Image (cartoon, grey):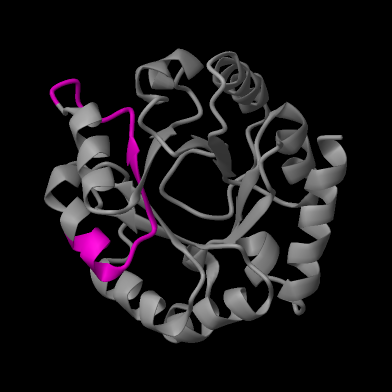
Amino acid sequence: MSLSIKILPSLLAADFGKLEAGARLAELSGADELHIDIMDGHFVPNLSMGPDVVEMSRRSVKIPLSVHLMVTSPEQMIARFAKAGASTIFVHVEEAVTCDKQGLLKLIAELGVRPGITLNPETEAEAVFPYIGQASEILCMTVHPGYGGQDFIESVLPKIRTIRERLNSDKLETDIMVDGGINMKTAALCAASGANSFVAGTALYGLSDMKAGISDMRIAAERARR
């Protein structure tokens, strides 16, 4: 059975003065989940949201919350975001070699949250192979993390294919998410390569009709993987 297509508006692209309204707009427009980027100004140069935004989103919407940690010390933050209402928590494979990433994924799962592993555009596919048995979802960044509105990096597509082939070889139905420069065209390219979960910021929040945008992106992705 093929994995379902999921569309996730990224709250980073919403009006920061109206984040609650932005979360509700995503749900009312038919989003499968809401994606929330957490940046600490160290792992990536930008700063963004904290547990309070996740907690607000959990109160405001019923759809799952996908929380992407771009932080230097995820072990200090995982429990707080789990308590705030995260449904999935992603940690980066690029964390320092001294960081016990398998331990982090185990901790996330023990807290009742889906564990996810993320890799940056320049990171080889093989870097996530030690964790694919633990991760419920693999996030392939298709831009350099830290800022929204960047152009899609097409050279990531072969990496998505490699990861999907490995998952198929291991008979694992694991979601592959892509994030960065995702629109109808790039979502289709990623779907054809094996992705099934799509984070889109400006391509959805920049529309006057997000509902139509989500529907169009879903159709484009479904057609591309046939």
**Picture layout, residue 161 above or below residue 37:** above
Q: Position of residue 7 (x, y in %)?
A: 65, 57
Look at the image and give the residue range highlighted in magenta: 80-98
**Picture layout, residue 142 above or below residue 208:** above
Q: Position of residue 11 (x, y in %)?
A: 49, 67
Q: Position of residue 197 (x, y in %)?
A: 61, 46
Residue 84 in the magenta stretch? The answer is: yes
| Residue 120 visible in the picture | yes
**Picture layout, residue 107 above or below residue 28:** above
- Identify which residue is drawn at 15% across, 44% down: 75
- Identify which residue is drawn at 36% across, 24% down: 131
Q: Quadrant of residue 149?
A: bottom right
Residue 129 in the magenta stretch? The answer is: no
Image quadrant for the C terminus?
top right
| 188 lies left or right of 103 | right
| Residue 71 visible in the picture | no
Q: Residue furthest front?
A: 1
- Identify which residue is drawn at 55% across, 21% down: 167
